[in-house]
Amino acid sequence: MDHLLFLAQERMESMQVSLRSMSSSVAHGYEQLRDGAHNSWSRMSLRHNNLGQDLAHKIQEMMRRLREILSTLKPEEIYQRFMFFVFTEMTKAHMYFGGFCFIVGGTIGIVVGMRLRASIVAPQKMRAVVANSYKGVESILVVEDMLAPRIVEPYQVLVQVKSAGIDYLDIKVAEGYARVLRKQLNKYNPNNTGEFPVVLGRDCAGIVVAVGKEVSRVDQGDEVWLAVPVFHPGTMSEYIVVNEEFLSLKPRQLTFEGAAALPYNIMTAWDALVRQAGLNPETSKGKRVLIHAGASGIGVVGIQLAKAWGAHVTTTVTTRAAPLVHMLGADDVITFDNSNFDKELLLREKYDVILNTVGQVLHESSTKHCLPGGMVVTTTMCPLASDSYGYISGALYSLLMRCKYFFTKAPWQTGSGWGTIRVAGQVLDTVSPMVESGRLQAVVDKAYSAQDAEVAFNHIGKGEQIGKTVLRFSSATPIRNLGMAFWQDH
């Protein structure tokens, strides 16, 4: 015990010496500050004798009073009083009260910090696949200095893209599809700096980096898959900011590549089969459905949806893709590269619903294979009238969009139509159980690294893919958010 007292006394003496040294340093610093202020003010007074005498007198008086207050402070006495309180007057009640205040203060700090999360993201550069003009595939390139998007609304989500899907629609966008619509709507997008470059891509899968304070569907760290409308900034970039209504939690069975191959194809097939043709689990049983080009990205989704809902599915494919569509559940497969599929269809019963994924060239022939009261639906993008508007029509269209923007929710952030398919994360929520049960599978044709995007687009242009081609974003620049850095190891 004596040894402990000796150590405590020695520690107290050391602290006294430190306090005396600190007191001397403070006093010396004060003297220098006062002398410096006095000299500076003296020089100013010489220049402005008639203007600053009263102010100089007040400052000198304030400095004198401050010195008097500091001179009354005795660090040794403060230290002795503190040690006397700790060793003689402190009780358990004091300790409990101090601990309680510490816990309450810490809890309040944590809550406030969580409330402030993910509101602003500092600008960073990122890699992206873009079109720098409307000249088609030759205008597509990979850039390394694209400005990363920021969360600017409370219902937005920042996603680190791990893999993004490539669609033939991206080539159409690089040729100018929806250019007027995109140009007008992106005027209201703070993350857009002009018409070019246009980030390509309609769907992706990745990890949530940050969320706005009103986001409820996902949280930081969640793995998600999503699709965006044609007028929205694309998904082929290391980071993307989207409205939470566009995304959904990624099914755990899917890899990032598989998850990136599905969302926009699901939206397109859903729009055709459900919204246009009225098919669903209750109405599809016993229906005969024909799907043209069943090995395309949309076709493989359409086959699996219709089959899962109880329909009889016929599809047309190349001989090379026939085993795949059989595996996906097609009841009847017609190969068009070694037979006349039109004659083959005449030998079969007619169909309640025909899904035309090819385009206008098959529309007329499809109608003759349709039952009375049946329906032919198409997934090909119709030309937008706004893309051909002249000066006067374009000005009126711009005015209409401005009015709609100010009287409704910001259109660039929502899945509202504007003449295009509706995109909603709720559709992904609906089909997720089908993915988890194995009734809806992803078909990835090829996976390229983001650096090889130009090669991937040339592959798409040949029209030989089965399923969907995807891009991998294997690395990402850290984005700093309110002093915190978010990134994933690769």
Image: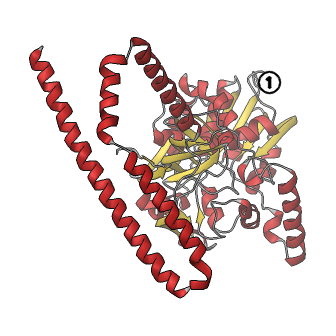
Residue 191 appears in the rendering: yes
- Label 1 amino acid? Thr
Q: Residue furthest bottom?
A: 47
Q: Please determine whether, in this image, residue 40 is positioned above or below residue 358.
A: below
Q: Quadrant of the N terminus?
A: top left
Residue 255 lies, in percent from the top left, at 45, 36
278 vs 336, left or right, is: right
Foreground pick, 187 / 167: 187
8 vs 120, left or right, is: left
Foreground pick, 55 / 290: 55
Q: Residues within 10 Å of mark 1 (few under 14, many from 20)?
A: few
Residue name at image x 77 percent, y 26 percent: 287
Q: Which residue is mark 1?
A: 283
Residue name at image x 42 percent, y 56 percent: 67
Residue 413 lies, in percent from the top left, at 71, 50
Q: Please determine whether, in this image, residue 171 is positioned above or below residue 348.
A: below
Foreground pick, 464 / 309: 309
Q: Quadrant of the C terminus?
A: top left
Residue 3 lies, in percent from the top left, at 9, 19
Residue name at image x 77 percent, y 57 percent: 382
Residue 207 lies, in percent from the top left, at 49, 41
Residue 262 appears in the rendering: no
Q: Secondary structure at mark 1?
A: loop
Q: Please determine whether, in this image, residue 144 is positioned above or below residue 424.
A: below
Q: Please determine whether, in this image, residue 429 is positioned above or below residue 37.
A: above
Foreground pick, 6 / 315: 6
